[in-house]
Image (tube, rainbow, N blue to C red):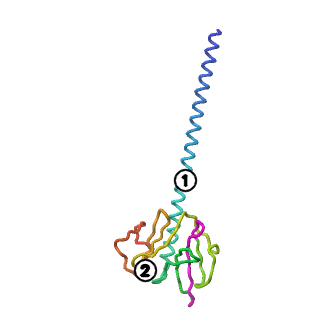
Amino acid sequence: MIKKTRNQRIDTVFALMIFCVFAVSVLMVLMLGASTYKNITEITRDGHDERAALSYIRTKAKNSDTIDSISVGSFNGLPALFFDEVIDYTIYRVMIYYYDGWVYEIFSEAGLDFEPEDGARIIKIPDLSFREIDHGVIKVNSGARELLIYPRGGNVPTLLEDPYGDGGAS
């Protein structure tokens, strides 16, 4: 009888040890999965934000409906993209620029002075730059992604590729 009780205790302790090993294993798998999920979510969010910023700029460019209304310049020492439009004989300007980790936009009458923090925050991305390249094509770079804006009514060079596959803004 004593031997049977002792065997039952050993069986109970053994079962409890197996349960503890199983519980620790499950906990470790869950922690690893949560960490992996967090990393994937951050990478996906960063990529989404860059795509959203480029899509926003591309939509602005497509809505610009006059020849030579889009240009690259400088706004308080920051590279900027300008969209000019005449409304009731007055020139208005949309400025899109990158400041302090954010894409900003200012819409105002052309020629007015502003500080970079006066603009409206659009979206946070790691980087943004604008550069005019051959034939008036504007290259927008957000770090890992690029967008080409083709001039309205201009000749589009065949050697340039559009990452979105639709010819950029026309």
| Residue labelled with disc 1 | 41
Q: Which residue occupies 49% across, 76% down?
A: 61
> Tag 2's secondary structure?
loop
- Relative to residue 150, is residue 146 depicted above or below? above
Q: Position of residue 101 (x, y in %)?
A: 58, 65
Disc marking residue 152: 2
Magenta highlight range = 88-103
Quarter residue 165 falls in:
bottom left
> Tag 1's secondary structure?
helix
Q: CA distance from mark 1 to mark 2?
A: 38 Å
Among numbered discs 1 and 2, the one appearing first in the sequence:
1
Q: Position of residue 97 (x, y in %)?
A: 56, 73
Q: Which residue occupies 60% across, 84% down?
A: 109
Quadrant occupied by the C terminus: bottom left
**Total numbered labels placed on residues in the image:** 2
Q: Is residue 98 magenta?
A: yes
Farthest residue toward the bottom?
Answer: 89
Quarter residue 102 falls in:
bottom right
- Relative to residue 155, is residue 32 depicted above or below? above
